[in-house]
Image (cartoon, rainbow, N blue to C red):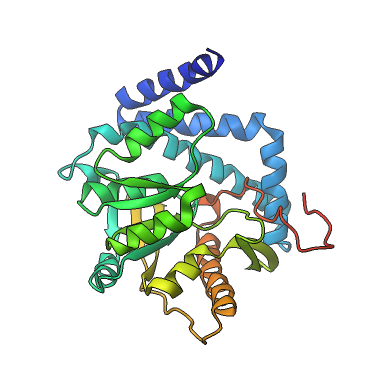
């Protein structure tokens, strides 16, 4: 019962955002996001600590401005998500447009499956949803939410147009099965990991424990790795789903070293996008939580 009571405010908020016009829903979502910015000091502390690590030369007020923008971005995404049932191929261009689709098409045509290298940047939920509306279904590696009622709602919206999900605990088996079918798989590769699933690679000048599974799978299957990010574009007042050219997999014959080298390359791609859109990345995640042996905690 307690879980159900926890879910009711979310369900009511979802209903409100869905019936509001898109602009009004954005304003409400952004107001909620800024409420979290002001009233959750723990999130602010983590965000500012991360920004201090990434941009040590940046003045504190500028870091605070970036962090405020993160909560604006999250609020906007919150407003878009409940509206997913309204969209079809005919009207989905209201929320997002493709940029660099030819890069995805070239990767898909190789018939070995496609791995989308992506991150918690901008409207990551919007990108996978819009891709499915256009008939380009994909599998997304996810972790179920703790609240089963909220998890059920989120899963239903994510899969409205044929997208599927691969449980994070079944990562390797699910990923290999999907690629054997020639599917496209989206992987958010910007979260803290622990060994042996993660290896330490550079991220903003600091070692970050990062998932090596996508690199190992790319080496094993020959799947194309395509950087794909969904960025809010103020001039368009909608999202741009940007596909970069296929990344060339590093192959020296030493599989373990190659897995780490490719992971470092993928992480540098993510870092470059975060540098371009710093106010749209999830700085409130403790990205550098896992430390190499003997190194002091960062948080």
Q: Is residue 107 above or below residue 131?
A: below
Q: Residue furthest bottom?
A: 252
| Res. 271 image quadrant | bottom right
| Res. 54 image quadrant | bottom right
* Residue at image coords 43%, 73%: 220
69 sits to left or right of 104: right
Q: Is residue 93 above or below residue 20?
A: below
297 sits to left or right of 170: right
From the viewer's side, name the closer residue of 146 and 70.
146
61 sits to left or right of 11: right
From the viewer's side, name the closer residue of 13 and 65.
13
| Res. 15 image quadrant | top left
* Residue at image coords 67%, 54%: 51
* Residue at image coords 48%, 36%: 75
Q: Does residue 234 appear in this view?
A: no
Residue 210 spot, x, y in % from top left: 60, 61
From the viewer's side, name the closer residue of 198 and 134.
198
**Total numbered labels placed on residues in the image:** 0
Q: Does residue 64 appear in this view?
A: yes
Q: Residue furthest left?
A: 90
Residue 231 spot, x, y in % from top left: 41, 54
């Amino acid at each position: 019962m307690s879980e159900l009571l926890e879910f009711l405010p979310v369900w009511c908020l979802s209903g409100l955002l869905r019936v509001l016009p898109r602009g009004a829903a954005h304003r409400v979502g952004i107001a909620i996001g800024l409420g979290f910015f002001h009233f959750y000091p723990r999130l602010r502390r983590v965000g500012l600590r991360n920004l201090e690590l990434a941009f040590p030369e940046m003045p504190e007020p500028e870091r605070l401005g970036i962090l405020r923008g993160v909560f604006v971005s999250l609020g906007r995404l919150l407003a878009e998500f409940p509206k997913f049932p309204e969209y079809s191929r005919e009207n989905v261009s209201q929320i997002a447009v493709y940029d660099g689709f030819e890069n995805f098409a070239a990767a898909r045509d190789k018939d070995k499956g496609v791995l989308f290298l992506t991150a918690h940047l901008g409207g990551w939920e919007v990108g996978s949803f819009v891709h499915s509306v256009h008939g380009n279904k994909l599998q997304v590696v996810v972790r179920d939410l703790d609240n089963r009622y909220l998890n059920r709602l989120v899963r239903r919206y994510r899969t409205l147009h044929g997208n599927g999900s691969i449980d994070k605990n079944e990562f390797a088996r699910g990923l290999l099965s999907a690629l054997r079918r020639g599917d496209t798989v989206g992987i958010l590769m910007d979260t803290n990991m622990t060994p042996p699933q993660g290896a330490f690679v550079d991220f903003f000048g600091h070692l970050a424990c990062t998932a090596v599974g996508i690199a190992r799978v790319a080496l094993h299957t020959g799947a194309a790795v395509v950087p794909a990010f969904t960025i809010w574009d103020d001039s368009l007042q909608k999202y741009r789903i940007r596909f970069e050219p296929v990344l060339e997999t590093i192959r020296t014959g030493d599989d373990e070293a190659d897995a780490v080298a490719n992971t470092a390359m993928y992480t540098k791609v993510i870092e470059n996008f975060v540098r371009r859109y710093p106010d749209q990345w999830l700085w409130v995640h403790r990205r550098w939580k896992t430390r190499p042996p003997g190194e002091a905690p960062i948080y």
